[in-house]
Structure formats: C-alpha cells, structure tokens
Amino acid sequence: MRTILISVLFLFLMCLIPAYAQEANITPYLRQIESGQIESARQGLEKLKKSNAKDPSVMFLDAMLTQEGKEALTKYTEIYQKYPKSRYADASLYWVYSYYYSLGSYSKASGYMAELKKNYPKSQFLTPEKKNMSSVKDDTNVTAIVEKKPLEKKIVNSGTKNVSKFTIQAGAFLQEENAARLMDSFREAGYFTEMKKKDVAGSTLNIINVGKFETEEEARKTLDFINTRYKLNGRVIRAGQ
C-alpha cells in the first residue's frame, strides 16, 4: 500500500557523518529506499550485516526494511535504548512514537515524544520549520516500506454506504505529497479515501482514511485484506475520529 511512505533528510544526515565516522555509511541505501529500489537496498543490507551486524546504523537500515510493524518496532526500540548516542537514535525513537500514534495509543505515544524532547532537544523531528525537508519518516507509512507497485482492485464497494460508522486509518505522514500518493493509489483501486490533518507535538500529520463501513466487522474484513496485501499496519476507527 502505501504510503507506505519515505524520504531521507539527506542534508541533515550528511552533516552528521563526521561525528559518527565509526558507524557504517548507509546513506546510499537510504537513497535507494527513497527511489523505490527496495531489493537493491536489501542486498546492500545483507552485505553490511556480514561484517557490521551490530552497527547501530546497519540496525537502523534493517529496521527501515522490515515490513512487519511489531518486528520493526522491536528493532527501532533496541537502537535508541542500546545506542542512545548513535546517528539514528532520535529517528528510531521518533519511529516508536509514530507507531503508537498510528495505533491510536496517544497517551503512550506522548510519553515517547516527551522522551524525544528530553533526550534529543535538537532533533530535526522536533523542529516544525523543518517539516518541508525530506525526513526519514516521509517515505514509509509509519511502519512499512512502500513498494511502488500498481494496486489490485478489491471487489468490495466500501465507498457507497449511506451510513458510515467506521473507516480504516491506513497511514500517517509528515509530507503531504506522500500521503496524497497513497490516497491516489487507493482511489485508483476503487476505494473511498480521504486525507485529514492533525497537529501532534508541533508537527502536522497527514492521515489517510480508507473506506466507509456500517459495521466494525465489515471494516475489519477489508482491513485484513489491506494489511496483508499491502503490508500495512492499519486499524479500524470510528468515522469522524
């Protein structure tokens, strides 16, 4: 699916390279992810893991290429907890925050945002004016890598219901253009899709909702298909939430 959505703050990250000279340089592979060359990035990761498996930058690349949400969460958590001074520690913590926010666990997400502010006060993710720059999160939909493949149409006309009580939150993005790309993909596949904006901790998230459903059961059936087919980590929410 997706969004699943992201480009890298290359200017920012490149400035950090001298300070973390002992860590592996994964910038070329982040660029491959940004351009949709997922398999090439995976091949690069395998080479790096042979000699630098415990390098925090290599671990970050591994997490970026992990499509299953909970598994990626575990990897990001290990990075910022075990290597708090590593190059991508703040990005990893931000990913953990984003994961829980996307699930609707706002209280838990706020705790991670507070930790980010306390431990990384100069982090790019805390600077609203930098939202126009590419960010590590922008190419991925919170927990997944977006493979640039055409979407297959699902034979479910979920957008024609007169009474809609539920919808599916498919992704949340910092960059509107990435959210729009995901939204267009779902529309091409025949789904009703809408984008909503929500301010969280000084950042504006572009949230993509898919489908209109009368019952939660109906929504969950489509959610199962979407999550499996497009490797997402969406969730069912009440319409208007």
Image (spheres, rainbow, N blue to C red):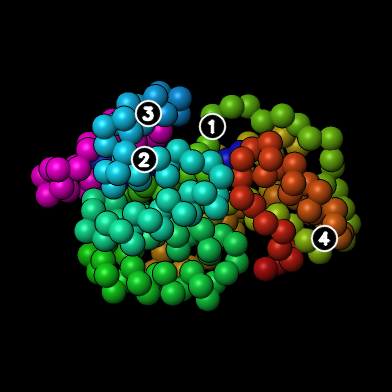
**Distance CA(mark 1)–CA(mark 2):** 16 Å
The secondary structure type at the circle numbered 2 is: helix
Answer yes or no: is residue 229 visible. Answer: yes
- Residue at 33% in and 33% down: 49
Boundaries of the magenta span: 12-35
The quadrant of the image that shows the N terminus is top right
- Residue at 60% in and 62% down: 103
**Distance CA(mark 3)–CA(mark 4):** 41 Å
Does the magenta segment cover residue 13?
yes
Does the magenta segment cover residue 5?
no
Q: Residues within 10 Å of mark 1 (few under 14, many from 20)?
A: some
Q: Which of marks 3 and 4 is in front?
A: 3
According to the picture, the residue beneath numbered tag 1 turns out to be: 147
- Residue at 39% in and 24% down: 43
* First in sequence: mark 2 vs mark 4: 2
Q: Residues within 10 Å of mark 2 (few under 14, many from 20)?
A: many
User: Label for residue 61?
Assistant: 2
Mark 3: amino acid: Glu
When the figure is inspected, residue 234 is found, relative to residue 40, above or below; the finding is below
According to the picture, the residue beneath numbered tag 3 turns out to be: 46
Q: Which of marks 1 and 2 is in front?
A: 2
Q: Are marks 1 and 2 in contact (CB under 8 Å)?
A: no
Position in image of residue 108 (x %, y %): 51, 72
* For residue 233, side relative to residue 206 (left or right): right
Position in image of residue 191 (x %, y %): 74, 42
* First in sequence: mark 3 vs mark 1: 3
